[in-house]
Image (tube, rainbow, N blue to C red):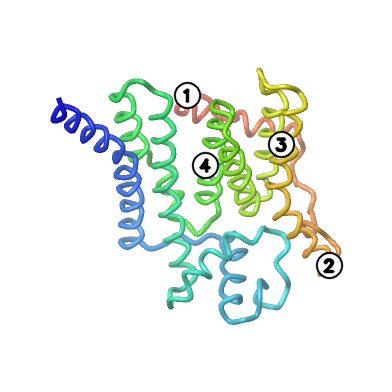
């Protein structure tokens, strides 16, 4: 009987290791692509790479001509700078950061699905789909913020789902901290925080006073780091988020473009703009 239990436990442990193995494979494939073709750099990459290099040189988070970084959050420039301590250039370090972020995103996604799906076949199939998903993998080979933002967004939603299901306080803290990191990666992370607050306020089966307490706790944890960053920006430039430039497109035009692109993604080119 003990032997049977041991075999069963071994099988469970092996299946538990699946998300980690799949995540490592995903990150490894992105790193292999970067070694072969290099890290893709775009015009927006300068927003993060220049402050990262200047930080390593002891000049702080500033651009080449001394202009202080305020129009983007600090997390992505800080991450390559951390790797740069070991003599790695900021662009190459950004590639390592994003490859790791992609692997961790796949790991978290498979772990999340495993906690919700009863079918192991479905979990394995979804894990393979994550690894072979070309678009996120290509995105992770670029010196841009998207992979890191996606990682923290997935972590936040995973933890929030765990909190609303099991109501453990630790899940709420992890969800809020992950949302804070997403917000420190891209300012659009505010939508992640707003959505979570709405879900907490509408949490069924929880007394209203507790819902408000949970929402306030989440807001404080998620908002304090960005609040301090915005205070720093205001003290240096008088603008918490930097200068906001108006869009060259109307709201209707932007909505039409978004709908067209979504339709192309959903129907594989079935809808084209005129």
Q: Nearer the viewer, mark 4 or mark 1?
A: 4
**In-image side of 257 versus 7 (left or right):** right
Point out the tag, 2 or 3, that comes first from the N-terminus: 3
Q: CA distance from mark 4 to mark 1?
A: 29 Å
Instruction: Return the disc, 1 or 3, that comes first in the chain's sequence.
Output: 3
Residue at mark 1 = 267
Q: Position of residue 38 (x, y in %)?
A: 38, 63
When the figure is inspected, residue 33 is found, relative to residue 81, above or below; the finding is above
The mark that comes first in sequence, 4 or 3, is 4
What residue appears at the point 47 percent right and 28 percent down from the top-left corner? 269
Total marks in image: 4
Question: Which residue is disc 2 drawn over?
Answer: 235
Residue extending farthest to the front is 2
Q: Which residue is at the front of the view, 86 or 41?
A: 86
SS at mark 3 in the image = helix
Question: Nearer the N terminus, badge 2 or badge 4?
Answer: 4
Assess disc 3: are there few (<14), some (14-19) or many (≥20) residues with their C-alpha within 10 Å of its C-alpha.
few
Question: Mark 2 or mark 4: which is in front?
Answer: 4
Residue tagged 3: 194
Identity of the residue drawn at 60% across and 51% down = 181
Q: Which residue is mark 4?
A: 155
Pick the front one: 47 or 114: 114
Which element carries disc 4, helix, strand or loop? helix
Direction top: furthest residue: 205
């Amino acid at each position: 009987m003990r032997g049977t239990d041991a075999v069963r436990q071994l099988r469970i442990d092996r299946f538990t290791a699946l998300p980690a193995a799949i995540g490592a494979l995903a990150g490894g494939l992105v790193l292999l692509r970067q070694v072969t073709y290099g890290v893709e750099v775009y015009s927006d990459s300068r927003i993060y790479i220049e402050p990262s290099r200047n930080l390593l040189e002891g000049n702080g988070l500033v651009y080449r001509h001394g202009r202080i970084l305020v129009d983007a959050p600090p997390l992505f420039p800080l991450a390559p700078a951390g790797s740069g301590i070991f003599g790695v250039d900021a662009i190459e370090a950004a590639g390592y950061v994003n490859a790791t972020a992609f692997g961790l995103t796949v790991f978290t996604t498979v772990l999340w699905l495993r906690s919700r799906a009863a079918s192991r076949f479905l979990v394995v199939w979804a894990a393979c789909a994550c690894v072979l998903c070309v678009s996120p993998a290509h995105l992770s080979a670029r010196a841009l913020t998207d992979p890191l933002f996606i990682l923290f967004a997935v972590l936040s939603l995973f933890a929030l789902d765990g909190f609303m299901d099991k109501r453990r306080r630790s899940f709420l803290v992890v969800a809020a901290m992950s949302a804070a990191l997403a917000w420190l990666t891209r300012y659009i992370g505010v939508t992640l925080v707003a959505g979570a607050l709405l879900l907490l306020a509408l949490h069924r089966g929880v007394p209203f006073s507790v819902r408000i307490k949970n929402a306030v706790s989440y807001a404080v944890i998620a908002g304090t780091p960005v609040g301090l960053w915005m205070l720093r920006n205001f003290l240096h430039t008088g603008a918490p988020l930097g200068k906001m430039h108006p869009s060259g497109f109307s709201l209707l035009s932007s909505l039409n473009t978004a709908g067209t692109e979504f339709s192309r993604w959903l129907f594989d080119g079935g809808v084209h703009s005129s």
